[in-house]
Structures are given as C-alpha cells and as structure tokens.
Image (tube, helix red, strand yellow):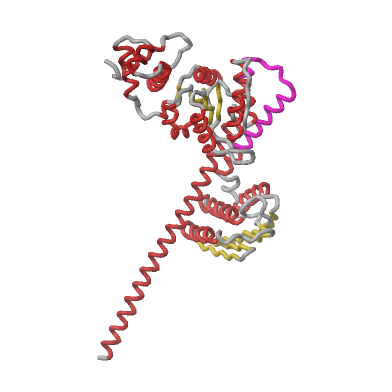
Amino acid sequence: MVDDHEAILSATIATLKQQYPDAEIYTAQTAQAAIEQVQLTQPNLMVVDLSMPDAVGDTARTEHGIQLLKTLMEQYPTLNIVVQSAHVRSLVRLKPMINQHEGGFTIVDKSLPMKEMLTKAEWALQGLIYTPKEMRSGLEVKPEWIDVLQLAFGEGLQDKAIAERMNVAERTVRHYWTKIQDALGVYPDEGKKNIRIQTEIRAREEGLID
Amino acid sequence: MFPQRQKYDLKNVVLIICVLLILWLLMSQFEAQRSLRWWYNRQLMQHCRDAEMIRDGLLQESFTLRRTLELHLVNPPKLTKESNHELLTTFERFHHDLKELSDRLSPPFLDDSLPLAIQHLLNGWQASYPLIQIQSNLPSDWQAQTYEQSRLILAMLNELLKISLSDASTAAIIMLCLTAQENVSELTIEIQSLNQAIVWFNWQDLRYLKQAFCCLMPGQCSIRQTNELIRCHFRWQS
C-alpha cells in the first residue's frame, strides 16, 4: 500500500483488512520506498496512489506516481495493481503500458465507496483490467482480440485450442480476454452472470462478431 | 528655393515624429500584451496550485472521513477518546483547508473595507513567513470602492510579496501605508530584505507587475529596486 498520507494508509489498510483479515500489509510513503518494498516482499497486490514524493523530503507530485507505475509494470509485468487516487485521469498517459500489462490493473477514484474499492481490489487480484470509461476514446479493439472473439464464439473453441490456433500461450489468450472485457465494459458480477456469455452479448451489440 | 527647403525639412521632421510615435505605440502595445500575458500566467499558476491543494488536501481528508464512517457502519466501533480525537482533527483540518480555499477565491472583508482585507492578507503572510516583520499604516475608515478595484489591488499586493519573498526563510521588514484623499487612493509598500539580497532576476517580474497594474487600473505604479530594498507605489482613482 503506497500513499504519502498517514491517514489514507490507515483508512485503506482498515478497509482491506475487512475483506482480507489474514493479509500481510506493507506500506510505503515514497516512490523509492515502494520499489524497495516490492523487491523485498513480492506482493500479490499493490495499492498505489499517484501523487507522492519520490524520496523522503520531496514534494508530492503525480509524475512520481506515474514513474513508479512505469517502473513497476516494466520490472514486474504480472504484478496486480490497484491505483487509488484523487486524480486518476492522469493515468491516461500510461494507457499503452496498461494495455500491455499482464497482471491485474484496476483504477479506483478516491471518491468511490468502500465496497467498490474492495471489488476493484478483488478484480486486480483475479488479474482483471478495469479502466474508467472516460479514459477511453470510443471502443478500442485490437485485431488479435477480434480473432479470439471469432474463434471462441464463431467456432466454439476453448482457450487452449484458441492459443494453439493463434500460436500464442494460453496465458496470453486469458490476457486478451481481460482486455476485451475491459474494452466492452464487462466485469464479474459476484458470480451472478456468466462473464463469457456477457462478453459475447456485448461483442455482438458492438458489431465485433456476426 | 530656401522656403521650399524649409518646407521639405518640416515635412521630414513631421514624418520622423509620426514614425517614432507609431513605433512607440507599437512597443507600448507589445509591452502591454506581454505584461497581461504574464499576469494571466501568474493567475493560472495560482489556479493550478489551488487545484493541487484540493487534490492533495481536501480530497484526501474527505476520503479519510468517508472510509472512517464506512468502517464504523460495518463494525460499530468502541470509540476511544483517542480515535474520537483523530476524527475531530481530520474534520478540523478539512474545515481549515476549505476556509483557506474560500478565502483565496474570495478574500474576506473585500466588499466592505480594503484596509481590513489587506490586514487579513498580511496576517496570512506573517503566519507562513515567521521571519518577516510587518509594519502597516492602514486607515480605520474607508470609503468602499468597487469590488473589482479592491480585488485587483489585493491581488497586486499579493503578487508583489510573492515576487519579493522567495522562500519562508526570507527575513524582511515590510512597511505598508494605505491612504485615500478625495477620490485618489495610494498604497506604498517597502520591502527591505534582512538576510539576503533581493535577487535581480525578479526585476522583470516587477516590471510586468507595474505594466499589468497600469493596463488593468485607472492609475499609476512606480517601482524602485536596490539590492536590499523594493519600494512600490500604487496610485489609483476610485
């Protein structure tokens, strides 16, 4: 958990402890301390603010948080990350990197209720991607995602077969699914709905598959 | 022949005067544009700082308050004296930050009394810069002027202090005198640095400040600067 405000750290830790009472939670208040902590602890999930000082004594700046995220995504491509910030819109400049990131990546505005924050943390732990709609410019879809949709819903193939047909690892196909679902705005609904069927419905609505 | 030559010379003189006048007008316009652009940038920077202050202060505090209440709803707490105190401190900080922002957006007393508004501004500077000594001579009676005029005078004074006092460790004596006679008001500020020379690169900013004042107010401004002293005199019609 990285945030330079002591009160925010306490409040967020208390929130996470509600959901994950046995979790070991480590904190850092600067970008440099955060990198050291990740190296030491190799966490399952990282909750990061954007505005923070680079080192002790520095002024808190959004650029430091952005730089920290860049470093983390480069060095730990499968790390699950939740960005919890009051200025999440600044993340738009990291959009290409977020798209490439293989771990979970969710974005939580600090104005969101506790329950939603915990949902986004759970999604990140599951390896899902969630970016606010306002950060997207229309429906951005990559050709390989269309291939996945066609192979899955056109030919009824499962992930393993899709991976073989596309000559990629099965993990990559799962990664494509999270990207497609984020682009279509399909997220887990506490197990009430089948997420793949929801994806198919939305993909047909958007005209991505016939 | 001779009168014709004289006529020719006169024409040339008139032509040169006209060219010089046009050049002077163009230069003045260019300078005015530059100073207004400078003024606009200073205001823009202040807006950015305010936005940062909202994001890094108010929004963080409101987040803490919200989470505390949400957690209390989930697990009704056995509130200790200490946790109550923490909550109250956060509320107080939240209130203080909001008040500060509100004062910056619309300075208090400005509708009624420029001297009181100036005094309030100086109190804020004194609190942030403990090493400055302020000696002010402000009239207790003041005939209300338009809000726009008073707002601009206060903004100019604030900018002058920002330009002159580079950081909180600056030790300086600030003398300020505000007077009004009939419909002409005057504000004189002397800033004398005690522990460092007032740096020369501020001169450009002071020049822009002076020009911006002349563009925006029906008045005059003069600024004198030596190594340790800035003397600024604003004079305007109310």
* Residue at figure coordinates x 45%, y 22% from the top left: A129
Instruction: Please give left or right for residue A22 compared with residue A72 in the image.
Output: right
Quadrant of res A93: top left
Give the x, y percent position of residue B116.
63, 50
Task: Pick the quarter of the image with the N terminus of chain B.
Answer: bottom left
Magenta part, dominant SS: helix
Instruction: Please give left or right for residue A8 compared with residue A180 in the image.
Output: right
* Residue at figure coordinates x 28%, y 83% from the top left: B8
Queried whether the magenta region covers residue B90, the answer comes back as yes
In magenta, the rendered stretch is B70-97
* Residue at figure coordinates x 49%, y 33% from the top left: A70
Looking at the image, residue A137 lies above or below residue A194: below
Give the x, y percent position of residue A15.
60, 20
Looking at the image, residue B172 lies above or below residue A53: below
Looking at the image, residue A117 lies above or below residue B132: above
Looking at the image, residue B128 lies above or below residue A74: below
Name the residue at the right extreme.
B81
Queried whether the magenta region covers residue B18, the answer comes back as no
Q: In this view of the protein, can residue B154 be seen by the observer?
A: yes
Give the x, y percent position of residue A173.
39, 17
Quadrant of res A186: top left
* Residue at figure coordinates x 35%, y 12% from the top left: A161
- Considering depth in this image, is B148 or B85 the residue closer to the camera? B85
- Considering depth in this image, is A152 or B18 the residue closer to the camera? A152
- Considering depth in this image, is A4 or A149 the residue closer to the camera? A149
